[in-house]
Amino acid sequence: MTRPDQPGDIKLVFDEPKLKKKTARHIADYSPRDRGERVKELGLPAYRAKQVANHYCSHLNSPPETWSDIPAGMRTTLSDLLTPKLIELVRSITCDNVMTHNDLCQLHVGVLVEHGFSRYTVSQNCAHSINIGWR
């Protein structure tokens, strides 16, 4: 079994969280025209939004440091504005010679989501499960 070094135990709380802030708007929430308007609010050219959408939506390329057609000084700003981090991997565990894989992720509002996937070679079946809780 492989486990990356993770600090402390994770405590699950099943009370609904009180949201302290609104969910950040993501590039998928905007129409193509609205994306351009949002970028123009920062004083940047509207076509930069189309470039980000091309990387993120067409090429499935989210790390801003790989967006070579956008100047390096703009990448982080555009990434924070249009592709905010909505989910983060907390812990990943594999075992059974990588036949079983579990991920624990935290959503931007603090909700924890556990995702498990197991393959069974004997019966050619697989099992998938999801558990949700609040931190």
Image (cartoon, rainbow, N blue to C red):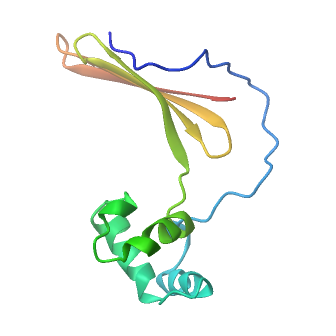
* Residue 113 place in picture, x, y as percent: 55, 32
Give the percent coordinates (x, y) of residue 91.
47, 26
What's the residue at 36%, 78% (across, down)? 51
Q: Residue at x 29, y 77 (%)?
A: 69
Residue 29 place in picture, x, y as percent = 55, 69
Left or right: 2 as drawn, with respect to 114: left
Whether 132 is drawn above or below 37: the answer is above
Relative to 130, does residue 84 appear above or below in the rendering? below
Count the numbered circles shown. 0
Q: Which quarter shows the N terminus?
A: top left
Dividing the picture into quarters, in which one does residue 133 lie? top right
Query: Quadrant location of residue 98?
Result: top left
Dividing the picture into quadrants, the one containing residue 61 is bottom left
For this view, does 74 lie left or right of residue 51?
right
Q: Residue at x 79, y 47 (%)?
A: 19
For the C terminus, the quadrant is top right
Q: Position of residue 4 (x, y in %)?
A: 40, 20
Front in this rendered view, residue 122 or 109: 109
Q: In the rendered view, does 132 fall on the left or right side of 117?
A: right
